[in-house]
Image (spheres, rainbow, N blue to C red):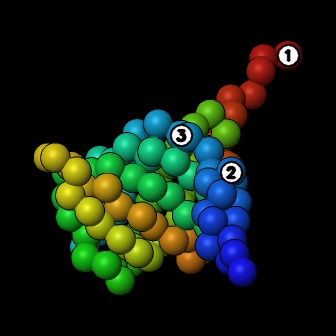
Amino acid sequence: MHNSSASDFSSKRNSQRLEFGESAVMRYHLQDIPIKVLDMGITGFGIHTEMAVPVGSLVEIEISDDSGLDIYQCLCVFCNQDGTFFHIGLEIKEQESELAFLPLENE
């Protein structure tokens, strides 16, 4: 009997993740740490940064774009060294969005 549930879960997880490649900020122990968001899914992020974060730690991710600022409260689920960087997996626990204030057009 062949059990494909693990491979099915993995392929579904990967299909739901979007490559992101944007710079953002991670707040950890009152420090703002620059990060690169490698990918983003429904439940979390994959990031690269120069600082290790212990598994189980809570961090805050700030991602800004033209539409405003998104702030995510996340739990570190893994942290692996990748050369001089650390590849970190974050599970989203909570999200807040702040709308950007758009300038009014002159009438």
Query: Residue 50 in the image: x percent, y percent?
Result: 19, 51
Secondary structure found at label 3: strand
Which is more foreground, mark 3 or mark 1?
3
Residue annotated with mark 2? 15
Q: Nearer the viewer, residue 11 or 64?
A: 11
Counting residues from the N terminus, which is met first, the one under dot 3 or under dot 1? 3
Secondary structure found at label 1: loop
Residue located at (53% from left, 40% from top):
20
CB under 8 Å between discs 3 and 1: no
Secondary structure found at label 2: helix
Residue located at (69% from left, 54% from top):
16
Counting residues from the N terminus, which is met first, the one under dot 2 or under dot 3? 2
Circle 1 packing at 10 Å, graded few (<14), some (14-19), many (20+), is few
Which is more foreground, mark 2 or mark 1?
2
Q: Residue furthest left?
A: 84
Residue annotated with mark 1? 107
